[in-house]
Image (spheres, rainbow, N blue to C red):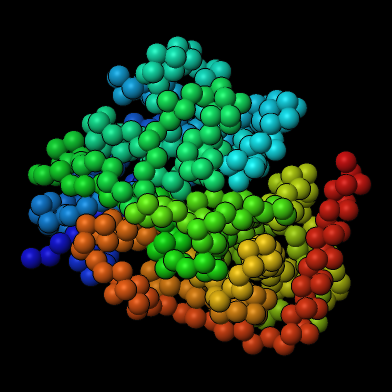
Amino acid sequence: MKSYILGIDQSTQGTKVLLFDDAGTICHKATKSHRQYIDEKGWVEHDPDEIWCNLKDLIRDMLEAADIDGRDIKAVGISNQRETAMAWNRQTGRPVHRAIVWQCARGAAICEELRRKGFDSLIKNTTGLPLSPYFSAAKLAWILRHVEGTKALMAEGNLCMGTMDSWLVYCMTKGQVFRTDFSNASRTQLFDIGRLTWSQDVCRAFGIEPSALPEVTDSNGLYGKTDFDGILPEAIPIHAVFGDSHAALFGQACHRPGMAKATYGTGSSVMMNIGDKPVYSQHGLVTSLAWSLSGKATYVLEGNINYTGAAITWLKDDLQLIQSPEETMNLAKAANPKDRSYFVPAFTGLGAPYWESQATGLYTGVTRVTGKKEMVRAVLDAIAYQINDVTTLMQQESGYRLPSLRVDGGPTKNAYLMQFQTDLLDCPVDVPEAAELSAIGVAYAAGLAVGLYDQDALFKDMKGLSYEPSMAGARRRELIQGWQQAISQTLAVTHQGA
């Protein structure tokens, strides 16, 4: 008789449900997307009820398609889109407003107001995060200011405010459990990452009562039980909750200090495990909690890059130089090695470690040698250069030497990009065979928590490709120097126009 673990990945575009057997192998996967509400201001929202209904549909379909007895499912884990925030009535369970998505900057005026009042240092030193509408706090403050009745609900103790994991846990437990984990709490910009509790001072600055926020629980803790509104014949424990990038770090087996992973998506999240003490970056990285497992907290340094995979989409959809992303590998390999062009993909500013929101994109070093192949190669190279910028800074600030970089996401299928990445980093780049790292992370954590899996056995034979550096040191330094000159030109143009 087999036993199973459910992994839920509630992401920006949709929700995935994956079923894992007792060896940790994926035996079923299904996805359902939800509507993106985007208005003329560029504000982005999701319907929390739609997401909950979609999850139940996926569970129902999974039981039928996989042809298993629901009693054989031993636990469920949840990973979720980070920073997306919402509020609901504690008594009725009804959302007071649609969820405000992490991409939405409607809290910018609130952040600017707090900056003028001198709160930015307090917030950065307490939460490890720079004051920004990107994080949950300003979104929740916006709800309190603009949604009628929310302040009264909060004063009465009847307002729940949280991220999407806490909403799903609340729904899955029929309103009995209101909790989040340490990784998600650390991304709200309301959590004291040193004291490991909601910060009274930061909450007060944003006008939020800590009593309206969820209880913070170990990432592999017990979050109650669920039968998904009667879909399962018996309730199963919810035994893992992680933010999606943190779940991928765990799924990539980056369990020791100095280990790092990079997710290549529309943009990129680069994350390094820095152990049991926080390191506060002085140069544009953020400090968060990786997780807390069985009472032991682990910290990360993270750098977020705005445009990586999206630059390839730009080549296809806007420049129409390619018809599919797969073409870029052979075009880059065939490019003229004498070309010295660089591309800085600052379409809407530069992210870590430069943080220049006014920067715009720049092609530089263009000569008559530069053609289609060379332009495509420059775009791919820019992805690797940006990852290298962040990992170099991480190593400097943490004191750890990167043993390898574990990577995931669509662009990791590009052998040219992965080889160039490993050459720049001068360390191996490991691409796992499995693609669903966030769901894997929470499913494995849940399975470990209920004793179904053995951690050493689970992670010892991770299959995949490993790229090894082959570039001469002098060539590497020459290329990186050229990239840094291109960045300097981009910043110089930006500041001249300011």
Q: Position of residue 204 (x, y in %)?
A: 57, 24
The image shows residue 456, relative to residue 300, as above or below, that is below
Residue in front for this viewpoint, 461 or 208: 208
The image shows residue 120, relative to residue 318, as above or below, that is above
The residue sitting at the front extreme is 195
Q: Position of residue 215 (x, y in %)?
A: 38, 35
Q: Position of residue 72 (x, y in %)?
A: 12, 56
Residue 52, by quadrant, is top left
Do we see residue 481 in this rendering? yes
In the image, 88: left or right of 326?
left
Do we see residue 132 in this rendering? no
Quadrant position of the N terminus in the picture: bottom left
Residue in front for this viewpoint, 370 or 29: 29
Residue for point 70% across, 38% down: 121
Residue for point 54% across, 50% down: 288
The image shows residue 457, relative to residue 493, as above or below, that is below
Residue for point 77% across, 83% down: 475
